[in-house]
Image (cartoon, rainbow, N blue to C red):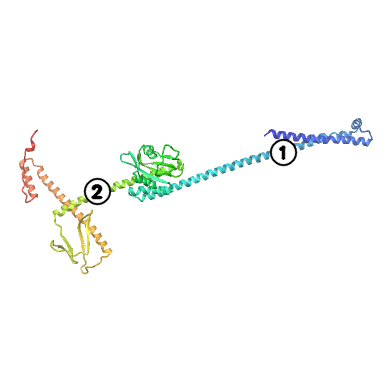
Amino acid sequence: MDKKPTRTRTSETQRYTLMGALFGFSFPLVGTILRIIFLQLPLNIFAMINTHLTDPVLWLVDTAPLVLGLLAGYAGRKQDMLSKSNEELSSREHELKIIQLNLEQRVNERTVELTIASQRNIHRSAQFEAIARIARTIRSSQTLNALLPRIAESISEQFGFYHVGIFLLDNSKEYAILVAANSEGGKRLLAQNHRLLVGGPELIGDVTTSGQPRVALNMGLDSAYSKNLELPETHSAIALPLRVSADIFGALDVQSVEPNAFSQEDVSILSVLADQVSVAIQNARSLEQSLEALAQVEASSAQMSKLQWHDFFEQQSVGRYIFDGIATKKINPNDEPPTAGLAIPLTLRGIRIGTIKLSAATDLNRVWTNDEIAIAHATAERTVLALENARLLQEAQKRAAKERTVGEISAKIGNLVNLENLLQTTILELGNKLPDTDIAIQFTSDNLAVK
């Protein structure tokens, strides 16, 4: 790049100098010829030399080639400098154009990258919003039977997947059983009690063993994983483990009609979704176990309460009472109770222990209002609780009296060391505490034989 301007500059300087010198030589030549003509001398080389040597003015004219050559060389030098400046400017302009093109290319590339990143962020944001909507949807379901189909339907609806299936491991963790699906083929598999071997060749079998997500980007070409005949439109699939801590209890099966539908970013996003699904399923299981345990406790409590009230009624007679508008009176067992217009059962833990009956004093066809019925029910509820508390208090008092009696007897016989006095005191105290009772103490040696 440096040699070309040097050749151009040297050529222009020499050319201008040569042209100036040649033009300068024309001055002494023309001057000599004109001088010969003025002197009327013959026009030949000798006359020209002689005239040139004898005329001092021609000596001055002889300097013209030098002067004009120098002037022309100076002009050529300026031209070379101008050409160099033009070349440098052109070079700078070319460099600027290249830089501009590079900048435009880089800007375009960066714009494309930003556009792709923006689209990726929008897609990721949409996926997280879909996960949030799915989480809100599955939170509304509490039982496992209602939750599992809702999860499959919500994932398919929010992400647009062809098939979503949920597998849970059996108690022996030998098979992964399909328990929910959204697609028609998946529902047919549900009816067939579809199950896959844990550790088997399918995606689900692999995931439930390794605990790592597995992706098949093209089911038609991927020989490791085969299509299910009930799901013919599947081209790519991903399976994700369902787990709590290190305990794998199932897998989430997601299938798409598009090949290469799942990127590494999709795997990360869907793994977050699988974790939320795992928590939701585990919470539903815990809730069902808690409800089952609560039902068992309530059933046991109701049975115990029933036995306790049965014993209570066996041990003592509870009468019937009526309020006649002035005072509360006890009804004799043989008297016929008045006809009730409204009967409210007294129910405790599912056990009916009595009834509140209301009848109109004058109008037998009276229609009870909703407020009156609500008041009667609320009164019945509080009456039942009060009766239960009274019964429990009575039993507690009985237990306290029994413990106190036992304590008093133990205190009186605890300091006695004479066998006869001890036996007499024991019989006496039991007789005082249990009146109208014959008490005897008998010793036997039948079971005391030494072997």
Residue drawn at point x = 77 percent, y = 35 percent: 15
Question: Crowdedness of circle 2 by 10 Å Cα count: few (<14), some, many (20+)?
Answer: few
Q: Secondary structure at mark 1?
A: helix
* Viewer-closest of 229 and 386: 229
Res. 384 mark: none
Locate residue 25, reporting x and y percent.
84, 34
Task: State the residue lying farthest toward the front.
Answer: 229
Task: State the residue lying farthest toward the bottom.
Answer: 362
* Viewer-closest of 78 and 270: 270
Residue where numbered disc 2 is placed: 297
Horizontal arrangement in the rendering, residue 206 relative to residue 84 (left or right): left
Locate residue 277, reporting x and y percent.
37, 45
Which mark sits nearer the N-terminus, 2 or 1? 1
In the rendered view of the protein, which quadrant contains the N terminus?
A: top right
Q: Secondary structure at mark 2?
A: helix
Image quadrant in which you'd find residue 227: top left
| Residue type pointed to by label 1 | Ser
Q: Between tags 2 and 1, which lies in front?
A: 2
Question: Crowdedness of circle 1 by 10 Å Cα count: few (<14), some, many (20+)?
Answer: some
Locate residue 427, reporting x and y percent.
6, 46
Image quadrant in which you'd find residue 267: top left
Between the residue at mark 2 and the residue at mark 1, the CA separation in whole angstroms equals 106 Å
Task: State the residue lying farthest toward the right.
Answer: 40
| Residue type pointed to by label 2 | Val
Res. 83 mark: 1
Horizontal arrangement in the rendering, residue 42 relative to residue 237 (left or right): right
Locate residue 446, reporting x and y percent.
6, 38
In the rendered view of the protein, which quadrant contains the C terminus?
A: top left
